[in-house]
Amino acid sequence: MLAGKPHADLARASAEGRLEEDSWRLRKDGSEFLASVTITALYDEAGALRGFGKVVRDITDQKAAETALMRREQHLHSILATVPDAMIVIDEQGRIASFSSAAERIFGYAENEVLGRNVDLLMPEPDRQRHDGYLAAYLAGGARTVIGAVRAVTGVRKNCATFPAELAVGETLSGGQRIFTGFVRDLSERERTELLVRELQSELIHVSRLSAMGTMASTLAHELNQPLTAITNYLETTRDLLVDPSAETVKLVREALHEAAGQSIRAGQIVRRLRDFVARGDVEQCAEPLNALVREAANLGLIGAEQAGVETVLAFASDGELVHADRVQIQQVLVNLIRNALQAMTATPRRILTITTAVESNACMQITIADSGDGIAPDIADRLFQAFASTKPDGMGLGLSICRTIVEAHHGRIWADSVPGGGTAFHFTLLRDRADVG
């Protein structure tokens, strides 16, 4: 002990009547301990000081426990101040008892603005009006499914703006009273990110369609040139026949104009298919007749196939089969797979392209595009549907990746396997329309 401290302590106790302090003391064996010391001045009936009463308690373990508890609380407060989820504690009456830093940040209120107020101020209508009734019903023995479950809710900030959120609620007892702790996660940023990703995917899919059109440009020019040349020839013949018209020449003119009109319709159909394929609109999945959808895509994808010596085999399921799909996007998958199959057979003497539709299960239809090419190189087979994986010297490797994105967005799957005798078969599935499945 410091010299003079005992006398100073007695003097303080005499002057103040009582002295209380915590200080370190020494045991007989030389070890130290933290003591709670109380010194009380004792007086006789005449008011004269008779002596002092001294009580010393060893509080080393007690102080250690208090310090550990304080550190744990500080650690907990530090965690709650940095986690992105808001923590809100309410009592049985729905009054806010605690409001974390994250809650202040998310909802825009300071803690002192909401303490003691009903938690329903953080909810929009009609949830705000119904909350007290829900809480009363729960306390009366209602369903326990809300405790521990994560559910989607809508929150209201101080500025009255609403936002999407996830809520998880826990329950505990404190002093005989039930308290509820809610953890709220603001999903605004996640939804903005998901929207951006969807927009980027839509843009990439659109660019892919334009790229596919670019690779088909020369073939398409040849395909369009045929009906346009025929129209020109028919019209020139008609002009010559009308120089000296007769009943016979008028009949020939009528036939020539009929043929020219037919070729014009053919050219218009080609242009319309191109326009529909390249156009970017909102994704709209609805019931589509599968075989008609595949035939329309094949008419576009197989342009130039006959001139390249490719034999096309079509094997379709019943025409009554419907699938739930966005027509333009699924036709993009089909055109991509068909053009890939045609390219895979450019160097092979045997060129057979098979397109089939079949019932895979009660829930799904399966579409297959098979070629008789050289097959898939082993070094790329495992990453065939990954972005930037390509077997073409000038390919970007996005076509099959986009196909997978589209198919999976339709809740289907896509895969490839080898064809016996040589070649590759690409398969993908689409959900059958609910009305069709029954």
Image (cartoon, rainbow, N blue to C red):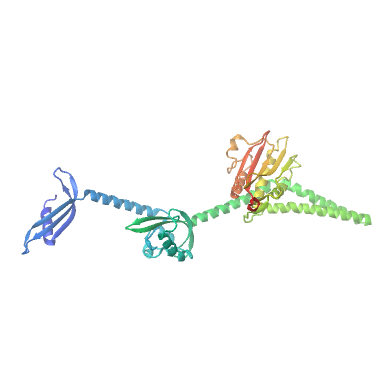
Give x and y (percent) for residue 418. Answer: 64, 36
Q: Position of residue 137 (x, y in %)?
A: 43, 61
Name the outermost residue toward the front.
Answer: 141
Q: Quadrant of residue 374?
A: top right
Q: Residue at x 67, y 42 (%)?
A: 369
21 left or right of 46? Answer: right
Residue in the image at 6% along x and 63% along y = 45
> Along the line of sight, which residue is nearer the eye, 338 or 212?
338
Could you tell me how many numbered marks the image carries? Answer: 0
Q: Is residue 192 left or right of residue 74?
A: right
- Percent x, y for residue 185? 45, 55
Residue 108 seen by the camera: no
Q: Residue furthest top?
A: 421
Side of 157 relative to 215 (left or right): left
- 113 vs 423: above or below: below
**Residue ID at (48%, 62%):** 162
Tell me if I can see residue 416 in this picture.
yes
